[in-house]
Amino acid sequence: MTTRRSFLHASGAGLALVSMPTFLAGCGNKDAGIEALATPAPENPFLSWFGIDESTIQRVLSELSKNGADLADVYFQHSKTSSIKMEDGIISSASTSIDQGVGLRCVIGDQTGYAFTEDLTLEAMLAAARTAAAIAKGAPVEVPAAFAATNNDSLYVTARPWADVGVDEKLPKITKLESLARGLDERIEKVTVSWWDQDERVLVATLSGLMFTDRRPQTRLWCSITANDGEQTVSGGANLAGRKGVEFFDDANLEKLAKQAVDRTTILFDAIRPPAGELPVVLAAGASGILLHEAIGHGLEADFNRKGTSIYSDLMGEQIAPEFVTIVDSGLEPGERGAIAFDDEGNETKSTVLVENGRLASYMHDEISAKHYGVEPTGSGRRQSFRHSPMPRMRCTFMEDGPNTRDEIIASVKGTGIIAETFTNGQVQIGAGDFTFYIKNGWLIEDGKVTAPIKDVNIIGNGPEALKKVTMAANDGALDTGGWTCGKNGQSVPVSQGLPTVLVSSMTVGGVDA
């Protein structure tokens, strides 16, 4: 069982693949020095360690825009990452590492020149700036005499930065989670606990005079279970993640995580395969947001629409869902994995209504797409690291509550239907929105009653068509707390998604033929 969800999308309108979360090892240490690993970073590591002040940034931006530029920015990043893995009560791996560098971008029309360097000396940065500026052949652009510096740390408040939390505090929590899980069921054969945390610093300065700094915490704790009852071996797990501090993993959350991991695994002993065919599908609140993210969300990222590869490219303002459906992509959800105070172009994040009362209301925009459409950026320009150029990306994507209750939705299912509760592998054709998802945990519905757990189920459908077939939505919306990571064009970024309980009147269910 892997331990991080990654959604791997081919470029353009290509194929999107979905898998369960994979445990992250640390990034490579690039000349950060032993001291940087051993001690907490200063409040502004770029200034304290490398002397990067406003005058340095002005010189680099001047070199970056010397041949002209519509947009230009520098993106500094410093990340300290730690991971620990325990298998059957024994620590099998542990690492701490530093990754740091700067990315430099010059944009002329639809062309982007991009270069990065892990060497933060002025000479190296100027050389990288010259490389990025090579796409332009115009006159120099005036560099700001001063920058409007901002920061915002209210979205992810932690008691202490992760860089200050030692292994001596993490190991007791890892050991306790392992013990809690193992003690819940005598059929458990193997317990694996994977811990990951990151203290990330970002500084972005733009040719327009914006400068922001951000300190972005991240953590994820995964519990993976293998159980055997003498006849079957089953596996499953659960994880908790967010922009949280070590206090997130208190006794209550450790107990909740252990129980969830064991329950999701041991229920598979009794699970059956449902009948195959066109069936009503109830999408459970929370984790079912992955279907919203993949089958619909990517189609609303502005670059796919600007290139005409999304099915939504010419549907702005059109009714694409029932009136009770409103879909939002927000960077403003405190402590959530997809929260981000500023995007990676220096724009303040927003809550963007994508679908309002069933009508397509907005795409997710970065600077380039916003200029193309003549609108303001939505704070959706994101990048994996300083090695990558930003593009429109999701943050926390969810459907707002509907008018019904979960019990009403289940009771409305006549004949046979299913509840889809947790998901693993899947794939999505971004342009058309065709998808297939594998349901790890779910339930059979017969004449309005939940009758049995199910397993080994695929659901197949089309995102836009499924959206039109949403007939009921409950008032129990929730963001899933799992460690979701979204992949697009070779870049991965942390995201969140959620959903209230939703009824889709018909999907193709790959179960047992009658």
Image (tube, grey):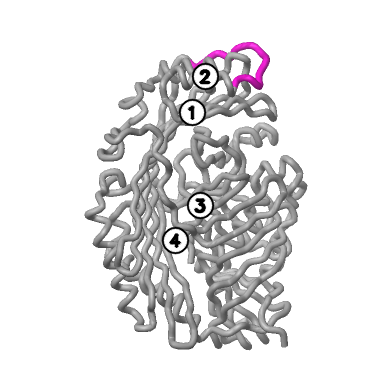
* Disc 2/disc 4 C-alpha distance (Å): 42 Å
Q: Are the residues tagged 2 and 1 within 8 Å (C-beta)?
A: yes
Q: Amino acid at mark 2?
A: Ala
- Return the disc, 2 or 1, that comes first in the chain's sequence: 1
Q: Are the residues tagged 3 and 4 within 8 Å (C-beta)?
A: no
Image coords of residue 491 (percent x, y) = 56, 44
Above-or-below relation of 92 to 495: below
Q: Nearer the viewer, residue 427 or 318?
A: 427
Q: Amino acid at mark 4?
A: Thr
Q: Which residue is identified by label 1?
A: 117
Q: Nearer the viewer, residue 86 or 503?
A: 86
Which label sits in the foreground, 1 or 4?
A: 1
Q: Which mark is residue 127?
A: 2
Q: Are the residues tagged 1 and 4 within 8 Å (C-beta)?
A: no
Q: Is residue 233 left or right of residue 443?
A: left
Task: Please tell me how many numbered marks the rendered image carries.
Answer: 4
- Return the disc, 3 or 2, that comes first in the chain's sequence: 2
* Disc 1/disc 4 C-alpha distance (Å): 34 Å
